[in-house]
Image (tube, helix red, strand yellow):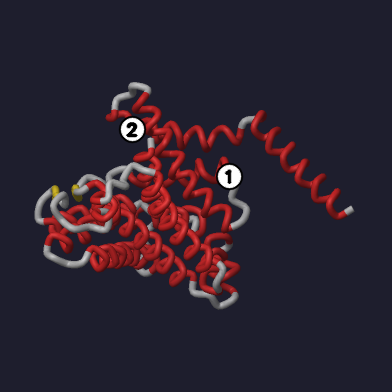
Amino acid sequence: MIVAVELGLIYAIMALGVYLTFRILNFPDLTVDGSFTTGAAVASIMIINGFSPVVSTIAAFGAGLVAGWITGILHTKGKINGLLAGILTMIALYSINLRIMGRANLPLLREETLITPLRDAGLLGTAMSVVVFSLFALAVKFVIDWFLHTDVGLAMQATGDNEEMIRSFGVSTDRMKILGLALSNGLVGLCGALIAQYQGFADIGMGIGLILAGLASVIIGQAIFGSRLIIIASLAVVLGSVLYRVVIQLALQAGLNPNDMKLISAVLVVTALVLPQWKFFKRIGGLANMRKSLTGAGAKG
């Protein structure tokens, strides 16, 4: 179960990237399935060729930036539908990733990685490793929170909320979309690099269906923990990623076939989307809002 929490915290970086496009920009980006593997491929091949794990991981972030930038250019300058632009980039990245790796699988078991110090010290799978991964995930979360409260970040939020309105104020919505997609896939590539180093290998198929895990983390987290404030919403994404991995682990421990993981993910997403629409949960939400209003009124009185 601790391993599931560790994976949830690492995948939270990817989920935060999905949050930027799915919630902030309101953009259905499927580049994630390809850019995740790109990050893993770039970091792995650089580590194997003697580069520092830190430099390799930064390069993976840069590769993700480029992947997101290409999707943004296809959508804004090429006037291609956003969903189709992401699919086209994802498909192209499959061949590019094979070119980068040279083969379908790259082992890193004998290489020095960012995870090696924790593994050599016997800290993986312990509370200490959970603390380390938590600090890293929270650091990325706070950077995103800070960015979204800058002028550029606010303009990006406005682009997702009302594109025509923010364009009337002289903001280039095309630039906001390109920047958002680049940052999102940069985080996804960074996550791919970390997962490859954590698992000890990079595989050409490791990103397939990953967008579903990202959406599950965002939707489940915000359905449970709320999404009104940016600070709370981003924290909900991190917690949602951990909860998603824990639920998957519980399902596997209950005896479900590992081949059913995608089905479980789909069921979780559907559940998180459908339950809040039921009358019972709407009533609970209404009572909670009423309680908050009464508490606020009492405090003012």
Going from N to C along the chain, the mark reached first, 2 or 1, is 1
Res 193 quadrant in image: bottom left
In the depicted structure, whether residue 255 falls above or below residue 43:
above
Q: Position of residue 140 (x, y in %)?
A: 44, 61
Q: Position of residue 101 (x, y in %)?
A: 14, 56
Res 164 quadrant in image: bottom right
Q: Position of residue 284 (x, y in %)?
A: 69, 34
In the structure shown, which secondary structural element does the residue marked by tag 1 occupy? helix
Q: CA distance from mark 2 to mark 1?
A: 24 Å
2 vs 1, front mark: 1
Say which amino acid is labelled 1: Phe
Residue 28 visible (yes or no):
no
Res 190 quadrant in image: bottom left
Q: Position of residue 169 (x, y in %)?
A: 59, 76
Q: Residue at x 57, y 58 (%)?
A: 230
Nearer to the camera, 174 or 243: 243
Q: Residue at x 43, y 39 (%)?
A: 244
Q: Is residue 200 left or right of residue 288?
A: left
Residue 242 visible (yes or no):
yes
Q: Is residue 162 left or right of residue 121?
A: right
Residue beneath disc 2: 261
Dot 1 crowding, Cα within 10 Å, few <14, some 14–19, many 20+: some
In the structure shown, which secondary structural element does the residue marked by tag 2 occupy? helix
Say the numbered circle drawn on residue 225: 1
